[in-house]
Image (cartoon, rainbow, N blue to C red):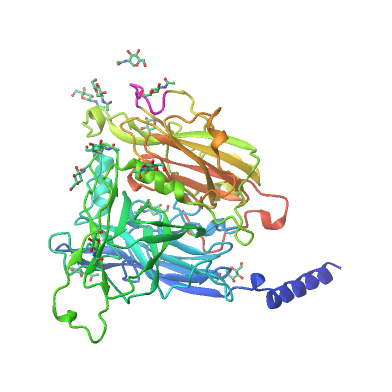
Amino acid sequence: MKSTFASMAALLYLFCALILPEFAVGIARHYTFNIKHHNFTRLCTTRSVLTVNGQWPGPRLVAREGDRVVVKVVNHIPNNVSIHWHGVRQLGTPWADGPSYVTQCPIQTNQSYIYNFTISGQRGTLLYHAHISWLRAYIYGAIIILPRKNESYPFQKPHKEVPIIFGEWYNVDPEAIVSQALQTGGGPNVSDAFTINGFPGPLYNCSSKDTYKLKVKPGKTYLLRLINAALNEELFFSIANHTLTVVEADAVYVKPFETDELFITPGQTTNVLLKTKPDFPNASFLMAARPYFTGRGAIDNSTTAAILEYEPPSNHKSHTKQLPLIKPSLPPINATNIVANFTRKLRSLANSKFPANVPQAVDRKFFFTVGLGTNPCPQNTTCQGPNGTKFSASVNNVSFNLPSVALLQSYFFGQSNGVYTTDFPTNPLVPFNYTGTPPNNTMVSNGTKAVVLPFNTSVELVLQGTSILGIESHPLHLHGFNFFIVGQGFGNYDPNKDPANFNLNDPAERNTIGVPSGGWVAIRFLADNPGVWFMHCHLEIHTTWGLKMAWIVLDGPQPNQKVPPPPSDLPPC
Ligand SMILES: *[C@@H]1O[C@H](CO)[C@@H](O)[C@H](O)[C@H]1NC(C)=O
Ligand SMILES: *[C@@H]1O[C@H](CO)[C@@H](O)[C@H](O)[C@H]1NC(C)=O
Ligand SMILES: *[C@@H]1O[C@H](CO)[C@@H](O)[C@H](O)[C@H]1NC(C)=O
Ligand SMILES: *[C@@H]1O[C@H](CO)[C@@H](O)[C@H](O)[C@H]1NC(C)=O
Ligand SMILES: *[C@@H]1O[C@H](CO)[C@@H](O)[C@H](O)[C@H]1NC(C)=O
Ligand SMILES: *[C@@H]1O[C@H](CO)[C@@H](O)[C@H](O)[C@H]1NC(C)=O
Ligand SMILES: *[C@@H]1O[C@H](CO)[C@@H](O)[C@H](O)[C@H]1NC(C)=O
Ligand SMILES: *[C@@H]1O[C@H](CO)[C@@H](O)[C@H](O)[C@H]1NC(C)=O
Ligand SMILES: *[C@@H]1O[C@H](CO)[C@@H](O)[C@H](O)[C@H]1NC(C)=O
Ligand SMILES: *[C@@H]1O[C@H](CO)[C@@H](O)[C@H](O)[C@H]1NC(C)=O
Ligand SMILES: *[C@@H]1O[C@H](CO)[C@@H](O)[C@H](O)[C@H]1NC(C)=O
Ligand SMILES: *[C@@H]1O[C@H](CO)[C@@H](O)[C@H](O)[C@H]1NC(C)=O
Ligand SMILES: [Cu+2]
């Protein structure tokens, strides 16, 4: 009886797969990522940096929606490493998510681990990156998710597709920077340049030959897959004399809109269409990026640029003469209104083919403050944080300590005792005027605390920025889910007034959202993916300081709604 049912189900599946394109079975895409050192020279400085297969940025991972991706990661470096497939939902594959000490222990030197997951219900651009300490400084690359075979984009088919990946270049080892910051308690030293596809571009000293060039033909449409893989800075991006059309964010299509200036936080991805000028323009154009920042510390405040170069017609004489290079204007560093306006323009397509499944009813509401704070300086030492303290950062005043075993493993094997507790505060323990005058005690508590959610809980989470040690935007990233950005505002969230303005029809659906500087954002998601899921600021220094926490989503009743046993090659602790 059982086997008859099973074979009928198999037949039905086969039938659907052959007849209906949306059931088309994906193929498996196999990759090997060798993590190893490679020398690169930028700004006249040669550094041995950590790479995937000797490449920086790493190789493109290309799949169609519905495909299985199998990546064997082999560690050839002295450091521990793990890789996170940022934004991939990992439905039913929580062991493949990748954050060290959350879903796995890291892959140790000369060891390997196979990440095996399916891309379902997503199309567009995501990124992968190392997820331990600051190794993602150079270990990152594009994940390109094409529509299923027989399916097309909901916008004009581009002539060409080009990843544009923002990163940072350090003249010193980023691991030395973070370890020094932790030791002194002060802010970290900043990067020496931003990069586009690994190149700082012509606006830095000793860098003009290290410029990424995008050669285009007139009268064509190009799809730029923008990825912010920088460690610590949110960025503005603009191309001189060209308007961009935003069509997708975090691997979800959006209602297309035009913009001259684009905003992208670390961990976010955005696809834009670039229509080239109809005729050869007798000029080249800079495509440039520089940071948005309202905090108090030092950041890299430089501008990276690439060149958009038109191929001259064959009969044109211009290739012999130097064409003028036009620079774009970029918003001022503290242009909070431009950020807010840009973020508000992002809307889901919300049509019958690509619906926005916004949870209309909410089972559990959470209110989390996110921001900086301080830790006491150890006795008889001098710290370089605020007033001789050490910098810290927290969610609801809890600075998260990573355990030395993986949370998912302790959860799955019922060994949470001494590893984590489930008493993460659902609201601030001590309410205060979050964006007003900060409290004079800025010390934070610490712990390894999680929130437990029953399967399929519908969650509303308000993330409230604080003014402690300065207002600043925090790009919060949630693993394992997309969420809908139903509301945002400045000042303190008002639970009585603000929900009336929530957009429950076509809000943007993403995995990373900047909590406005001196403001709040409200998100909703359905906890339909059992496992342990990390949530953290994607400014790496804030994560280092503890702006992170974990959600535990319990099993559902069906066999495919349970955390499966770990793969046999899961790295040991
Ligand atoms: C990098 O260059 C240094 C000398 O500058 C050399 O000793 C080292 O072997 C090189 N490393 C690699 C991986 O090529
Ligand atoms: C990946 O997972 C699928 C589904 O569980 C399995 O059939 C396949 O054998 C796995 N591949 C590898 C290389 O582990
Ligand atoms: C670029 O834009 C500027 C200002 O809008 C304009 O003056 C100039 O003619 C444009 N140049 C080209 C080559 O499009
Ligand atoms: C960043 O650089 C710009 C121009 O180079 C300058 O006007 C601005 O004050 C700088 N901002 C910070 C925060 O350093
Ligand atoms: C940005 O900084 C400039 C210079 O410090 C200041 O004049 C301006 O008021 C600031 N703008 C915003 C929106 O904070
Ligand atoms: C932001 O949008 C508002 C309302 O549409 C507009 O009044 C304001 O000028 C915009 N600000 C900026 C800096 O673009
Ligand atoms: C701190 O210094 C004082 C005086 O130098 C000494 O008595 C005390 O033992 C030191 N404490 C620690 C924890 O080292
Ligand atoms: C540092 O201490 C001074 C004087 O006690 C105080 O006015 C200031 O607010 C403190 N700064 C911080 C960042 O805590
Ligand atoms: C919070 O602080 C802000 C800025 O100082 C102030 O405008 C507001 O009235 C304060 N709110 C409350 C409830 O005290
Ligand atoms: C700290 O703040 C409280 C009120 O928020 C105030 O009563 C107290 O005097 C402050 N303490 C110091 C040392 O400034
Ligand atoms: C956590 O807090 C305790 C008590 O304040 C403190 O002793 C300890 O150093 C803190 N640990 C970390 C990792 O910040
Ligand atoms: C690497 O990870 C293992 C397992 O968690 C740990 O025991 C070891 O101390 C780590 N090594 C380094 C250099 O961090
Ligand atoms: Cu942050």
Residue 442 on image: x %, y %: 34, 26
Report whether 458 appears left or right of 306. Answer: right
Residue 243 picture quarter? bottom left
Is the residue 198 above or below the residue 236 in the image? below
Report whether 13 appears left or right of 27. Answer: right
Report whether 267 appears left or right of 36. Answer: right
Question: Between 107 and 317, which is closer to the camera in this rendering?
Answer: 317
Numbered range of the magenta stretch: 433-442
User: Which quadrant holds the N terminus?
Assistant: bottom right
Residue occupying the point 34% across, 34% down: 471
Is the residue 175 above or below the residue 76 in the image? above
Report whether 361 appears left or right of 79. Answer: right
Residue 339 on image: x %, y %: 37, 45
Classify the position of ligand 13 by quadrant: top left, top right, bottom left or bottom right: top left
Is the residue 106 above or below the residue 299 in the image? below
Residue occupying the point 48% across, 73% down: 157
Residue 226 on image: x %, y %: 38, 61
Task: Judge whether residue 246 can be spotted in this image.
Answer: yes
Residue occupying the point 37% across, 25% down: 436
Question: Between 304 and 490, which is closer to the camera in this rendering?
Answer: 490
Task: Judge whether residue 231 can be spotted in this image.
Answer: no
The overriding secondary structure of the stretch rendered in magenta is loop
Residue occupying the point 35% across, 64% down: 164
